[in-house]
Amino acid sequence: MLRGQSAPVTYGLIVVCCLVFVLSPVSGLNPGYGDGARLLAAEQTYFERWGVVPVELFSGVPRAALGPLTALFVHGSWLHLLGNMLFLYVFGAMVEDRMGHLPYALFYVVCGYFALLAYAAAHAGSDKTLVGASGAISAVLGAFLYLFPKARVTSLFPFLFFLPLRFPAWLVLPFWVAIQWLAAGQGGQGTGVAYLAHLVGFSLGFLYAWGVYGWRAKVKGTAPATEGDSQP
């Protein structure tokens, strides 16, 4: 991350997502939701109200159209939240700095919305709820790859015994995309991860950066180093 970099949108998104999660029944920190069966019922209601339910989204219910927007701030577990926020923290600030605060905010929301919408369209008959900022954050990764292809990313690869190794973004992020592609091709639903939303978000982010900034926006020479995991 660039020293002295101002990224109020990125940090604001992280704060909002964390607050929403802590106040939700999913965090387990709010005693008002009770425990046991009562807590599970509250979680189910929470996801259905604020998440994306594909079968409802395409049923003509006006309220359901807000689902892909509100779902960007809802997460299903502590691991889900922390993983997403780590990636947003690592990659978001540099992209925001290059795009500008307001364009970046619109980019994040619009790409995230359409990533979730694409997933819902591909599973239009499903009643399973989809939540999370992964689609929007994948768009940030796509834009990062185009804007900062030579930035070196510290990554952890399981098959290399989780040794922290540094590779350029042009190598790490396409590898991440390949993993998402393979997982999506295998269905990807067993783990509850919407890999298709990741792929759509990444593609939208990359294409947006390419279309808006063109070759002029690419970093010339070695970009400042950043750090992150190889998996979102």
Image (spheres, grey):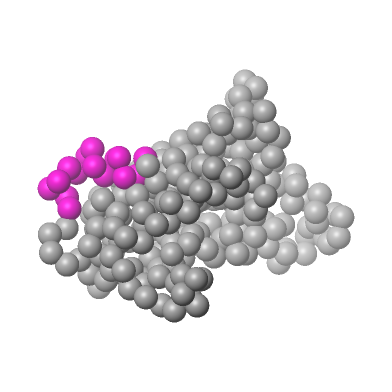
In front: 147, or 133? Answer: 147
Name the outermost residue toward the front.
159
Q: Is residue 91 left or right of residue 23?
A: left
The correct choice, above or below, for 189 with respect to 1 in the image is: above
Q: Quadrant of residue 126?
A: top right
In magenta stretch: residue 25: no
Write the residue at 48% across / 46% down. 181
Q: Is residue 215 magenta?
A: yes
Magenta range: 204-218
The correct choice, above or below, for 35 with respect to 163 in the image is above
Task: Label the magenta part by its dominant secondary structure.
Answer: helix
| Image position, residue 79 (x, y; %) | 60, 64
Q: Is residue 23 visible?
A: no
Residue found at the very far right of the displayed protein:
37
The quadrant where residue 200 appears? top left
Q: Position of residue 119 (x, y in %)?
A: 54, 36
